[in-house]
Image (cartoon, rainbow, N blue to C red):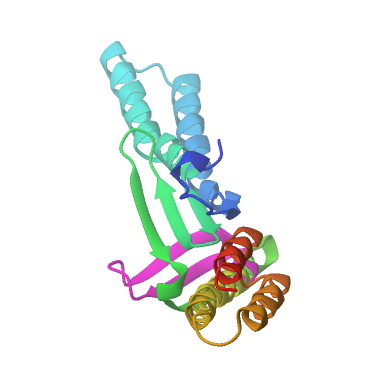
Amino acid sequence: MGFPKRLLADHEEMVLDLKPHWIALVGPAIVLVLVILAESLLFSYFDPPQVVTWLVLVAGAILLIAFPIRAFLAWATSHFVVTSDRVIHRSGWLAKRSMEMPLERINDVTFTQSVFERVVGAGSLRIQSASEYGQNHFRDIRGPEDVQKLIYEMAEANEARMRGTGEARTETIDTDAGSPLAEIERLARMKDKGVISEEEFETQKRRLLGRL
């Protein structure tokens, strides 16, 4: 199941939706195999009393629920998401946990990989943010170096978009000075560069034409 798009804000685009790397399931899988193997050997070579049999079965079930099953549910419900505006980490099935960091408040992104993690394509990310969450450590990330690069690229795009909005506002204020026709030409150049939308251009154009 993917990250629910209903949680995205208006005009926010999802760029990346990652589940943890399969390496996160190796430990739980080993525990699962050991529990099944231990109980199979116990009942194959021994004939314990019924009370002992039930105790062993209950203990095995508790161990499976406490570690392998719980770990699999955490893996299946965990999402590391990068959007055009923020980084989001969401996990949990019944009890959910979610945190988010606006791209403009991210100060630094670093990744680490052991030799084995590099072979399988996994690693960890550390994101330093000026938000309330501070520094965050995310383990078992798929392709951490590529994710690091993507976060930087989206942060730069987000900053450029915010600068463009500020430029558009400045240019709009400046239309009150100078010749209306010259201002229309300048707005047209801004529209061609993508600084303002077609709708914003037409609105300002009608206002300027009303001054002729």
Q: Residue furthest top?
A: 50
- Of residue 5 and residue 159, the one placed in the foreground of this image is 159
Q: Residue furthest right?
A: 192
What is the x, y in percent for residue 82? 54, 59
Question: Is 201 rendered above or below residue 167?
Answer: above
Q: Residue furthest front?
A: 212
| Residue located at (66% from left, 79% from top) | 181
| Residue located at (51% from left, 32% from top) | 37
Would you say residue 4 is visible in this rendering?
no
Residue 140 part of the magenta segment: yes
Image quarter in which the C terminus is found: bottom right
What is the x, y in percent for residue 5? 52, 42
Asked where in the image residue 102 lies, by quadrant, the reply is bottom left
- Secondary structure, magenta segment, majority class: strand
| Residue located at (47% from left, 61% from top) | 87
- Of residue 19 and residue 99, the one placed in the foreground of this image is 99
Question: Is 176 rendered above or below residue 158?
Answer: below
- From which residue to which does the magenta span run? 122-147
What is the x, y in percent for residue 138? 45, 63
